[in-house]
Image (cartoon, rainbow, N blue to C red):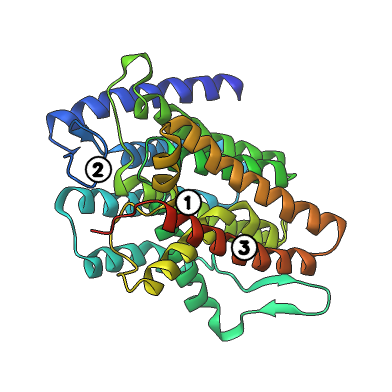
Amino acid sequence: MNNTLITYSIISFLLFYICTKISYKLNFVDIPNKRKIHSKATAFTGGIIISVTLLIALQLFESYFYFYLNRNLNLIFSMGFLISLVGLIDDKFNLNAGGKLSLQIIPIFYLVVFENLALYQIGDYDYFKLELGAFVIPFTILSVLFLINAFNYFDGLDGNLSFLTNSVLIILWFLVSDENFKMFLIIILIPMTIFLFFNFSIFKLPKLFLGDNGSLLFGFIISFILIYLALENSIHPILLAWSIVIFVYEFLSINIIRLKNNQHPFKAGQDHLHHLLFVKIRSILITNISIVLINTILFLLGYFSFKMISPLASLFLFILCFLVFLILRNKYSKKVKIKIN
């Protein structure tokens, strides 16, 4: 298995290098404008390269996936390629919101309805169990779309979404006890980590962005991994929610603040958390580390409240922490000049 992982890592790196070079040749590049802080046209194919790498993983680790892992995990990679392709089309041709959403729903609908990768309940809290009943399908589809867009909100600064997604995968690695599933998470972590070398041009590698094809892919994969773990009853749903807590809090907070200020909730702008922190810190690396730390500290609060008190206490703390986050987020936003285009 170790030799296969080494081979997989080498193939991943070569695929990134070759495809990034091709992306520049084919003009799959993000052009700078007044809303973007980069100064040079940069390839935006990071997500589609990662999705192709994960498809290669299905072949390299075929026997491992067949014997040890559920078929649904294979489908997450396969459908992930389709969702990433939607993002690539959007990056290149700038789809309208309706067209983009329609194409996103197709692979999501397939996994939820035909493969039963759906949330049937969201936790047993001793005194009550939150069963979804007739709302299973609409709730699951809306939850996936919510999380995909929440991931997209963090794709505005080099490394931000990648660092955060990797931190979520590491939290899940810590929570699960199944060694085979831990290997599945490592298979995802490898190309996502290699991407960072290109994103930051380490060793003068050609610079590469995730693009929407990457943010859609990351949100899609994490969404269905969480659903899979909830279905397996291996991790309580409230702990799964704590693993992505910063995505949930930021998405809800920024839209509430925008509505409060009579601004369009879904328009692009520079009022996201990473923008606000970067204006203050002026360091991309420290900004990324700060946001990862916020997510990790909040997760630890939720984890220890779950273990030391009860799932119900953890649920109440999740809601309470959100209210505190919203108040602080709104207060901090007023101190920093924000911009909605």
Q: Specify the amino acid type for callout 2.
A: Lys
Q: Which residue is mark 2?
A: 36
> Is residue 294 placed above or below 110 in the rendered structure?
above
Picture coordinates of residue 258 (x, y %)? 38, 68
Taking the image as drawn, is residue 72 in sight? no
| Sequence order check, earlier mark of 3 and 2 | 2
In the displayed structure image, the side of residue 41 where residue 278 appears, left or right:
right
Where's the C terminus, which quadrant? Answer: bottom left
Q: Specify the amino acid type for callout 3.
A: Val
Helix, strand or loop under label 2: loop
Picture coordinates of residue 193 (x, y %)? 47, 30
CA–CA distance between discs 3 and 2? 30 Å
| Sequence order check, earlier mark of 1 and 3 | 1
Q: Which residue is mark 1?
A: 221
| Mark 3 vs mark 2: in front | 3
- Residue count near mark 1 (Cα–Cα under 10 Å), binned few <14, some 14–19, many ≥20: many
> Is residue 208 placed above or below 214 in the rendered structure?
above
